[in-house]
Amino acid sequence: MAIEIERKFLVKRIPKDKIKYSHYIKQGYIVSDKHKAIRIRQKKDDFFITIKGNKTGLSRFEFEYKIPESDAEQLFKNFCNEGVIEKTRHYIEHKEHTWELDVFHGENEGLLVAEIELQSEIEHFSLPEWVDQEVTFQEKYFNMNLLSNPYNMWS
């Protein structure tokens, strides 16, 4: 059983000099509600189906499987009715942790969110100087919610 423990933060600026590597991500949702999500994702030239659910605190179940490109294309086309999220993900090392900084495109242009995955909910970590306020529990920042309520519609 896979457990994901992550925290999300807004970003003050992109620390271009600290980026280890980056890639494009496209993702859509087959199911997305407060209790579960089934997502299709393209990460570079690889394709995945991910099942997430039963969030408790910072933890939730997460199962991810690589799938053929042809299957992903059909799932994007026929099952991701709300559209897709597109973003560039930058990986940045900071004091024994890897931060994932997402730069959103399209209707979410201008939104910058950094995530850190932890081994436990009480694990201590250091915030980089380019990280701003925490938004872990603010649902409007969940990727699945950015489809129905995109960043450029916020006041």
Image (cartoon, rainbow, N blue to C red):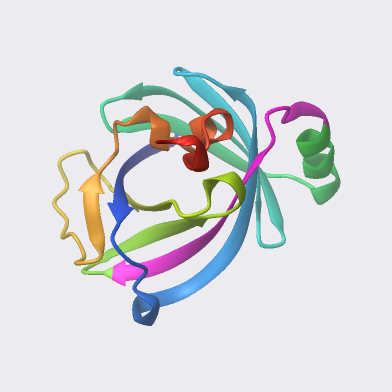
Q: Residue 27 placed where, x, y %?
A: 63, 43
Q: Does the rendering let one see residue 147?
A: yes
Q: Residue 144 placed where, x, y %?
A: 53, 32
The residue shown at (18%, 59%) is 127
If the image is split into quadrants, where does the N terminus sit? top left
Q: Which residues are magenta?
A: 78-93
If the image is split into quadrants, where does the C terminus sit? top left
- Residue most toward the bottom? 17
Left or right of 77? Residue 128 is: left
Residue toward you, 103 or 80: 103
Residue toward you, 126 or 61: 126
Left or right of 69? Residue 122 is: left
The residue shown at (23%, 54%) is 132
Q: Residue 19 placed where, x, y %?
A: 41, 75
Residue 14 image-quadrant placement: bottom left
Q: Residue 104 placed where, x, y %?
A: 52, 53
The residue shown at (29%, 31%) is 137
Q: Does the rendering let one see residue 117?
A: no
Residue 83 falls within the magenta-colored stretch: yes
- Residue most toward the front? 155
In the rendered image of this protein, does residue 62 appear above or below residue 9? above
Left or right of 151? Residue 55 is: left
Residue 135 falls within the magenta-colored stretch: no
Q: Main secondary structure of the magenta part?
A: strand
